[in-house]
Amino acid sequence: MNKHNILKQKRYYLIFISILFIIFLLLPPGELFDNPLSLVIESCEGELLGAHIANDGQWRFPNTSMVPDNFAGALTLYEDKRFYKHPGFDPLALARALYQNIKYENIVSGGSTITMQLIRLSRKGKPRTYFQKIVEILLAFKLELHYTKVEILAFYASNAPFGGNVVGLTAASWRYFAKSIEELTWAESAMLAVLPNSPSLIHPGKNRNELLRKRNWLLQKLLNNKIITKDSYELSLMEALPEKPVSFPNIAPHLLVRILKNENKTTADNTVIKTTIDASLQKKVNSIIMNHYELFRANDINNIAVLVLKIESGEVLSYNGNVIFPENNSQNNGYVDNIVSNRSTGSILKPLLYAAMLSSGEILPNSLIPDIPTNIGGFMPKNYNRSYEGAIPAYKALARSLNIPAVRMLRNYGV
């Protein structure tokens, strides 16, 4: 084969490889993450009512479609200051990282952009080698061709680790500050921006001095770049770090469990489940229930359930399945949802029978009703406690849900 043919063959190979590379870039990237998600329920106004941990033990909320300006500004300045200008990889950062690694004869810097870090997160634990770095660069470049910077930032914020078993900005915001991401301050945003860099080392439970130092360093950098004002900077320095992770809101626990069972799974889809619950009303009913429980439990009344419906549409405005009282839960079974628990239909009809006989004038509240052994054509009703009162006022028979007086009243009144 002569030299001309060899060059021609190499040219064909180069064209073929180039076509394959272009096809690779043009093909849309597959789904980046298939991790199980927490089930999240919201009120009709969008307020968080409750969440159930994902089945891999992580608090991982469904992807957010937006990232607050505070966090976006803090994160890009800390991790990737040329994020909005590069095509997925930053040649200057890579050159600096290569120089430092050669100088110290060790990998001390990766030079990864936020897009490259997102790719590394999606590839789950690939070794940090130069070959893998090249793969990350190619995949990051491809990702930038198919998604906007805002979408990439949202992907990263939704899937970055934030210490412990907290994944994603939304879960971290609730876990550390008990608020939605839209309410984060500059100090809180700066603290969260430094966590994904080393989540196993820095989180509010330990190394607090190092976490505080990094947060304040980032705040200083935000001031120097004129992203925040001097007043905002000084006020942010005064904000304390969270003492410890806090519990997620649990405003409608029984509804959360019911939805979880109805969904027949332990994770949610890529959407948050929005309910018809009125958050303000739900909280008020919760408070009323607890006040009544304090009064009633002295009389051994340990369960209360309330369902509030909108008459015109049938929408559920408040769902309170029981009283969850941890100190007394073994006695009152507070986690049992009494809204969906089976009921005795006879007991449900007793108040209707009582009201009907009051209305017809056949009884008064203090009318004495026989509570004695009774046999009606072989049917022998029994009271729940298997005892008899002899004669008992009608209102007391109703309050105690006695069966024999109710049967005798029904026989007189008629079906």
Image: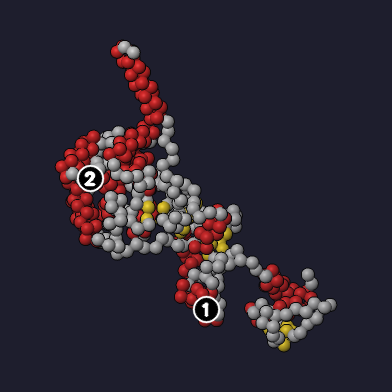
142 vs 160: above or below: above
Q: Residue 105, image x and y in percent?
A: 18, 44
Which of 89/269 is in front? 89
Say which quadrant the N terminus sits in.
Answer: top left
Which quadrant of the figure has residue 306? bottom right
Judged from the image, the secondary structure of the residue bearing numbered disc 1 is helix
Which of 9/68 is in front? 9
Which quadrant of the figure has residue 206? bottom left
Which of 322/114 is in front? 114
CB under 8 Å between discs 2 and 1: no
Q: Which residue is mark 1?
A: 297
Disc 2 marks which amino acid?
A: Ile
45 vs 282: above or below: above
The residues bearing labels 2 and 1 have C-alpha atoms spaced at a distance of: 64 Å
Residue density around tag 1, few if under 14, some if 14–19, many if 20 or more, within 10 Å: few
Disc 1 marks which amino acid?
A: Arg
Q: Residue 132, image x and y in percent?
A: 32, 39
Q: Which residue is mark 2?
A: 107
What residue lies at 35% left-to-right and 36% top-to-bottom? Answer: 139
Q: Residue 318, image x and y in percent?
A: 52, 61
Q: Residue 255, image x and y in percent?
A: 53, 60
Say which quadrant the C terminus sits in.
Answer: bottom right
